Structures are given as structure tokens and as C-alpha cells.
Image (spheres, coloured by chain):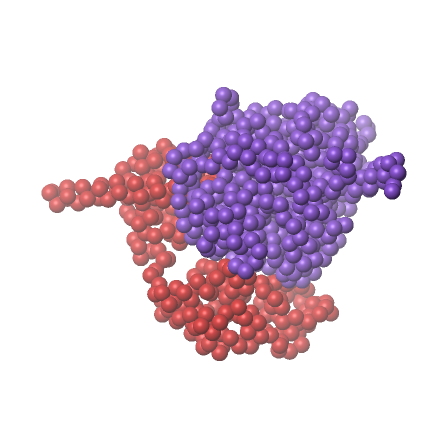
Chain colours: A red, B purple
Amino acid sequence: MRVFCLLLLSTAVLAQENVELGAKVFIQTCTVGYCHGANGGPGRAPVLAGRNLDAAYVAKVTRDGIASTGMPAWKDRLSASDLNAVIAYALKLNGGSAIFAPVPASELAAQAIPAAAAKGKSLFFDPIRGTRCGTCHALESWGAAVGPNLAHSQPTLALMRNGKGGQIQTAAIAGGPPFPALLIESKGGTARVYDLTYAPPVLRTTEATQLRFSGKAQWKHSEFVSSYSDSDLNSIGEYLKWLALH
Amino acid sequence: MMNPQRFAACVALTTAAAFAQQETRADWPHYGGQYGAWRYSALDQVNASNVNKLVPVWQFQTGDSDGGLQATPIVRDGILYLSTSHNHIFAINGATGEQVWRYTYPLPKSFTTFYGAWNRGVAVSDDTVFIGTIDNHMVAVDRKTGREVWNVNVEDANQCGCNITAAPLLVKDKVIAGVTGGDSAHRGYISAFDTKTGRLAWRFWTIPAPGEPGNDTWSGDSWKYGGGSSWMTGSYDPELNLVYWSIGNPAADFYGDSRKGRNLYTDSVVALDASTGKLKWYHQQIPHDVWDFDTAYENILLDLPVDGKPRKLLLNVNKGGVVFVVDRVTGEFVSGYPIVKHINWITGVSKTGELLGRNEPKEGVPSFICPAIGGGRSWNQAAFSPLTKQLYTTAIEWCQEVVVAKESPQEGKTFFGGTFEARNPKGERAYGHLDAVDPITGKRLWTYKSKYPLLASVLATAGNVIFTGDPEGYFFALDAKTGAKLWSFQTGSGHRGSCITYSVNGRQYIATPSGWGSAVAGLISQLWPEAAEFRNGSTLTVFALPEAAE
């Protein structure tokens, strides 16, 4: 009995700390701008205070979001402690005890990444470059899935620099000028190709009969990675190596 | 030397020609009507003496009411093109309301965005309809069939925390679009795409990179995530071949200590060469903004005399409730005036365009700032009538409590640097109004007072009628000369979009979107709790005079 009381007490203390942290997280993530109102009051998003919201429901919606609305899956954006804290705070707004089954850290996407790989990742998705790796390659829920999936590859520097894009062909639509193209699909009389003339790639749709291929394209990966130094590409290689192992 | 009479005749002719370029007639070809964004039609079949006989002739339900219906319909050759939340496009017969085709945008189901599902319109060329999307793509569809032609992912929306909600601007062989993200850790841009291929033609970064002029107006690395979104539609002057775009607030919105400096080109109007995207001039309204008072809204191009001399002007209403008029050839400041009574973030604008008496919110303690973040006016556009020479703009009298908080940027995530909550102004209840003002001096001809903020665009016509709608669902007409209410119709849901007028086979139609929603609509319930119950919807209602009465 004593053990049980002690456990309950420690949970309650934890919950109180959670509520205070949760209030801060709420201000910086939920009540910002045009979403939920301050203290869970009126705003663009639903009122959260005083609605007797169910603990399991609050935890699920906060963790997984609501598809096709402005409510994101916070498990992809917050640390475990921040996520659990903000759930605790939302429950407190509903007069609840702020005690609930916390989301385990193992469910969350964020993982510790070594410095070298982290540098590579920041280069891969470097927003300051108009064209970056992520313009054509998707990884870890960022980027555009046009080029090969690199999640399990460990390309050499030479390949990163001078890849030839084996599947890229020269194409023309309706007798127009030729361009380097990656065929995505051709069905029901409709063809879709990525036009890789410049970044970002353009997905072009045409009647299949209007699309003509004329052999392998003179397309160079080097033109798309020209803003990266060899040292940059080596860092990106470190990131891909780390990713392949995780 | 030209004699004064010949000079006056020359001015009158030039002005008449310029006016003709800015009026719409049978079509409503661009977001703002014509390239100069007047939202003024030369159609006068419906006029101040018969507008009270208007009847609804057809309605179109879009079926997607998330975020309301915020679009400006485009009309060409009797076909109306309407975009909805989640980027669906409908081509509709303008006379009968029958659907010609529908384009359903393939949005990934799991996608969510802070910037809302809404869309504010399409651009239409001879053969293509263009739309910017909720997940930051630009898409072209065939104008006859609605089939997709090209689709380009401008920048990954999950990473940038940005997207496109505004109508694109079509200029010759390019379609130009801005981007949201000014309240996120993001660096804004304006992109031009080749209309045929979708290939990127040029990009203007709204924040200069190191080595470029203006980068030194940002301390440290703050330029990397400094906001500067371009979230509404630009204007275009064909004679000067200049595109005019408004650039939004710097991020973090309220916390400015980590981005010391003027923060160019945020809160500026930029003039870009339409062919290359190169900067010709800029006019910054608010150096180092700490209020989130974007220079984001429409740029109205006016050819009017100033001190007796004809000038090519550009008028922009700042979110802080202040109008800035500049010379659109050079960017030189001409005049500035407030459109709201309750304004305390500055005490005024000097004769050379500098802000006077800046009242900056404080870190950690509540600051009472007027107007509220929703704006002394929201993005819904004003209208200009060449008949009355008046600007017709809405305005909102409301305030807020802001608490500034230090914040570090996390790429693509919201980056406000503080919180806010709406408050009534001192001494009176918050309210909205629609005013007729002299565009150069701000002298007010009349005021129409509204219980709630008016969040729909204004339409002016040669029939001397002003149209707009209110949050309760009433679509109404005012006399352009007096502001007297002439007619109203309950459409069933609040107004947040932009009404237009057009004609088919000689019959004039007035079309208004209705459908309550949007970010600012959400804030309204902080001051008017009953607004939380305002009905949502997404309907286009089209009016005309009964056929016998024409």
C-alpha cells in the first residue's frame, strides 16, 4: 500500500511538472498565430478548455493529428517529454488530473543523430540552396520523391557527383523540343513523365500517343549538385550511411 | 513648351486610356479584375437605381467547406473558373451554372498545414488554368477539359512549412506565384514558371543572401529564416514590364532582437522585371517590423494627378491599417494615411514616408496594440472607381494584447516570437467599416459601419454600385456616391471571398462566393463569441436583373 501511494505521489508530481512545461509548449506550438486560442479559448481551431475531453482522445489526436485538417501529428515534431507535457496541459484545461498513459519515446520519429551525419542531413535539405538533394530525393518525410530512394543506399562520391541517371531518356511531347525525361507511368492512354531539364522537376501529363522517346538522355547529375563541394558530398554520404544503418 | 490646354488634353487622354486598361467588361480575366487590381467593372446594366431588383439566377455548391470559400472567380468567354479549399477547380457555364468540368487535386491524405486548406483563385490563359496548392505545388490544367498538364513541387511543404493560397499572376509566357510561410522559420520567394512546360523561369528571394545588397540589414544568420512571404497576388504594368509584389512580415513576427536591422525586403513593395525577376526598386513600409503588419495585400495601379502633375502611382494598404502610395516608376513615396481610428503602433507617417512614434510590444509583459494582428484591414481587396475617383476599402477597429517571447527558429515550424489575444479598443466595442476615401489624401467621403469586421473583397461598377458581403451571410449593395445601402440578400453563410461581375450574351451577372472560414475569421470569436456559431459553407451565388426588367 505504501509503495502504491509513493508511486501515485511521484506520478502526480511528474504530472504537475508536465502541466507547467505543457503550458510553455502549448504557447509555442498550439496557440501561436491562428490556431487554438490562448489558454484553450476561442481561435481558428476548436476551443480546448472546459469540454471534458477524454484523456485517450486528447492523447491520440495530439500524437497522430487529424488528417486533412490543420492539426498535425505532433509525434513527428515534438520530443517525447514535450508531447506528453502538452497532452497533460490540454487535459488540465479540461479539469482533468493530467494523469494519462504517456506516449513512449520509442514511438517518436526523432532519434539522436551523430554530428557528422547531422551535418550531411542539413546539407541534403539545405533550404538556402535553390536546388538541394531534397529537391529530387525524399528521406525521412522531407523532400520530393522523384529520383531514387536513397534510404538504403551508400553512394560513392563519384556517383553522387557524376551519376548518369540510367533511366532518364530523351523525350518530346507533341513534336515539341526534346527534354530529359523520367517515365512515371503510362496507362489508360495517358503518360506521365518528370521533365528534368531544370530543378525542380516538372511532372508532365500527356496523351501517351503524343509522347516520343529517342534514346538515353545526355543528362548530368553534376549540374544539379554543382553547389555542393566534395567535402559537402562526403558529409551527405555520412548521413546516408547513418540512415542505411537505422 | 506645351501649352497648358494641350497638356491638360494630353493628360486626360492618357488617363482615359489607362482607365480603359483597368476596367473589366464581359470577362473578369485576372484576380484583381485587370492587371492594375481595381476590381472595377465598366458594366452598368445593374446600377444604383435598379440594383434592388437583383434576383439569384443560379447557385453552385462546391461541396468543400473547410476554410470557407475565399476565391475570386475568373471569367473568360462565358465560362467561370472557381477554385475551392484543397485546390479543386470547377469550370462552370456563366449563364446557367452548369458544371463543364471538375479538376480534383490529388492531395496526399495525411497532409496537414498551419496555413489552411483555402485557395484564393486561379489564373487563366488562352488554353490553360493555373493554381498554386495547399502543399506548395504549381499545377496547370487544360482549359477545355480540366485534365492536368503539368505539376511542379515548388519546395517541399513538409520541410518549408509554406504553401500557396493566393491566385497566381499570368504575365505573357510566365505564371508567377508567391508563397506563404511568413510566420514560419522560412525564407520567402516569388517564382515564375514557363506556362507551357512548368519549368522554373526565375526566382526572386525576398531576403537577400550574403554578398547581395540588403543582406546586411539582417543581424547574424537571421536572414536564413526571416520570413518575408509573398502570400497574395501581385500586379503588373505592361508599359513598364514591371511586376509589383508585396512582401510580408519578418519572422519571428514579434521578437525582433535576433534579427536587428531593417530586414529587407520584408514589409516592402518590390518592383521586378517581369522577364527576369530582377529587382528594379523597392519601397519598405515598415523597417524592422515587430507587429506582424505585413505589406502583403493588393497593389492598385493608379494614374492620377498629384499636386497637379500626372503620376503613375501604386497604392498599397498595409495590414497595420495604413495606406502607402508610391510612384510606381521609381518607388518614391508619395503619401501615407491611416484607414482606422484605433491605431497606436505608430503615431503617424512623415511627409517622406518614415514611421513616427513607434510603439513596440515588450518582452514578457502584455502590450496593448491597435489594430489587432488580423489587421486594420485583412487581405480582402479594396476597389477603385474611376467615376467617383474613390478607393473603397474595408477596415477593422480592434486591438490586441501581445506578449513578446524570445524564440529560436526551427525550420518550417511556426516562428511568432510571442502570443496575442484580441481586445476591444479603449472606450468602445470593436467593429468594422467600409469607407470611400480619396486614394491620395485619405479624405473620407462616406463610411458604412458594420457590427462585425467585413472580410470580403469589394467590387465597384460603372453603375455606381459597391458590392460586398458580411460575416453573417448578407451580400449587399451600397451607393458608390453616398454609401447608402440599396439592397441585400442572405446567402446562407458568411463572406470571405471576392465577388465579381461579368456578362454573357449581353446580360450582366454579379457572382459572390459565400462560405465562412479562414484564420482571421477564427480570431473574430475572441471578441464576438457568437461568431463561433456562424454557419460554414461553400457556395457561389449569381445574381442578375429579372429578364423582363433589363
Image location (x, y in percent) of residue B420: 44, 36
Residue at figure coordinates x 52%, y 48% from the top left:
B263
Q: Is residue A78 visible?
A: yes
Residue B164 x %, y %: 57, 50
Reply above or below: A144 against B186. Answer: below
Which of the image's four quarters has the C terminus of chain B? top right
Q: Quadrant of residue A32?
A: top left
| Nearer-the-camera pick, B159 or B347 | B347
Q: Quadrant of residue B34?
A: top right
The residue located at (19%, 44%) in the rendering is A10
Please state the horizontal and vertical placement of residue B186, each as a whole percent of the image.
50, 52
Return the residue found at the far left.
Answer: A2
Q: How many marks?
A: 0
Using the image as rendered, state which of residue A127 and residue B103 is in the foreground.
A127
State the residue in front, B173 or A87: B173
Q: Residue at x 74, y 36 (%)?
A: B306
Q: Is residue B142 left or right of residue A100?
A: right
- In the rendered view, would you say A143 is above or below B382? below
Q: Residue at x 33, y 48 (%)?
A: A82
Relative height, residue B517 to residue B111 (above, below): above
Q: Using the image as rendered, state which of residue B419 and residue A133 is in the foreground.
A: B419
B531 on left or right of B20: left
Q: Is residue B66 visible?
A: no
Q: Is residue B530 above or below residue B153?
A: above
In the rendered structure, the answer to whether residue B26 lies left or right of residue B532 reads right
Quarter containing the N terminus of chain B: top right
Q: Residue B520: image x %, image y %?
A: 53, 36
